[in-house]
Image (spheres, rainbow, N blue to C red):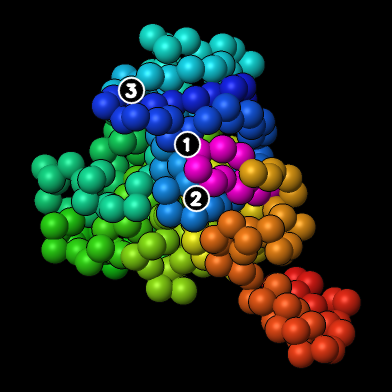
């Protein structure tokens, strides 16, 4: 579980905060969708949750953070980084550049945990199977497409079995089948007790697995609550977020003077 209380963050040299007074409770076993227009603060929130600010990315962090009930001070943000994996939208930013195969690249994080050889191999092989990318194992990471690199990076995170996992647009370079593989794997991880936070634009796919949702705009939380009502309602669209298909269809039916079916979008 991670709790944020009044968290405000301003990047070094910025004239205004990128996060403003954020209060959130992110319980274990949850999948929280973070949505909002460009510039809303989604990436900054991900960096805070992963413990990368202000230690790695400079700036002023205010407010209180707790991880699993233990307060995290500004000087101890590495405590977050130690138990939280992060995946960024650009896979190139997370590729080491020193490994000859995608399997070795994905194994590097788990290897740093001091696992026995057999346990390491089992974890990485299982992560590749979960994402359906066994064919990439012996490929040169530098010669993979952007989407393939992203899948390998996510496999590396899955192999580490983090208690908390934060992903910033993890499916930006993936097609629909690849997106569903990733999201299904993340949902399975949450069922095993992990806390998952996903900042994404694909609200239809995200709504399939999200238990909770947070709407950000201009660095502040506009709304937070159960994912179904929030993502399926009109509020995200009013704040620049892509509508779910069922919400969009219901709106257009109503605009035509008709009554949308009461069960429109159920199970979508």
Question: What separation in Å lies between label 3 and label 1 (alpha carbons)?
Answer: 13 Å
104 relative to 161 in the view: left or right: left
Q: Which residue is mark 3?
A: 59
Residue 161 visible in the snapshot: no
Q: Going 70% across and 73% down the picture, which residue do you hit?
A: 247
Q: Disc 2 or 1, which lies upstream in sequence?
A: 1
Residue 78 visible in the snapshot: yes
Q: Nearer the viewer, residue 232 or 189?
A: 232
Give the numbered dot on residue 199: 2
Q: Disc 3 or 1, which lies upstream in sequence?
A: 1
User: Residue 112: horizontal and vertical position, in percent?
Assistant: 29, 28
Q: Disc 3 or 2, which lies upstream in sequence?
A: 3
Residues drawn in magenta: 212-221
Q: Is residue 214 magenta?
A: yes
65 relative to 93 in the view: left or right: right
User: Residue 13: horizontal and vertical position, in percent?
Assistant: 26, 27
User: Residue 229: horizontal and vertical position, in percent?
Assistant: 77, 57
SS for callout 1: helix
Q: Are marks 2 and 1 in contact (CB under 8 Å)?
A: yes
SS for callout 3: strand
């Amino acid at each position: 579980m991670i709790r944020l209380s009044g968290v405000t963050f301003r990047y070094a040299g910025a004239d205004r905060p990128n996060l403003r007074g954020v209060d959130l409770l992110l319980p274990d076993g949850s999948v929280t969708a973070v949505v909002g227009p460009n510039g809303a603060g989604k990436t900054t929130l991900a960096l805070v949750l992963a413990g990368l600010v202000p230690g790695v990315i400079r700036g002023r962090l205010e407010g209180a953070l707790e991880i699993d009930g233990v307060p995290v001070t500004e000087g101890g943000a590495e405590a977050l980084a130690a138990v939280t994996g992060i995946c960024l939208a650009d896979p190139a930013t997370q590729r080491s550049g020193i490994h000859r195969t995608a399997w070795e690249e994905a194994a590097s994080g788990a290897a740093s945990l001091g696992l026995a050889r057999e346990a390491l191999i089992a974890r990485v092989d299982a992560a590749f199977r979960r994402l359906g990318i066994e064919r990439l194992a012996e490929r040169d990471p530098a010669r993979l497409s952007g989407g393939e690199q992203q899948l390998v990076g996510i496999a590396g995170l899955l192999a580490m079995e983090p208690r908390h996992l934060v992903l910033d647009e993890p499916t930006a370079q993936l097609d629909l089948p690849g997106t569903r593989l990733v999201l299904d794997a993340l949902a399975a991880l949450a069922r095993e007790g992990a806390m998952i936070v996903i900042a994404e634009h694909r609200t239809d796919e995200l709504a399939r697995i999200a238990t909770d949702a947070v709407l950000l705009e201009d660095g502040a939380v506009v709304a937070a609550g159960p994912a179904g009502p929030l993502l399926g309602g009109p509020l995200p669209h009013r704040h620049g977020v892509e509508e779910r298909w069922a919400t969009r269809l219901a709106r257009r039916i109503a605009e035509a003077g008709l009554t949308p079916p009461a069960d429109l979008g159920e199970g979508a």
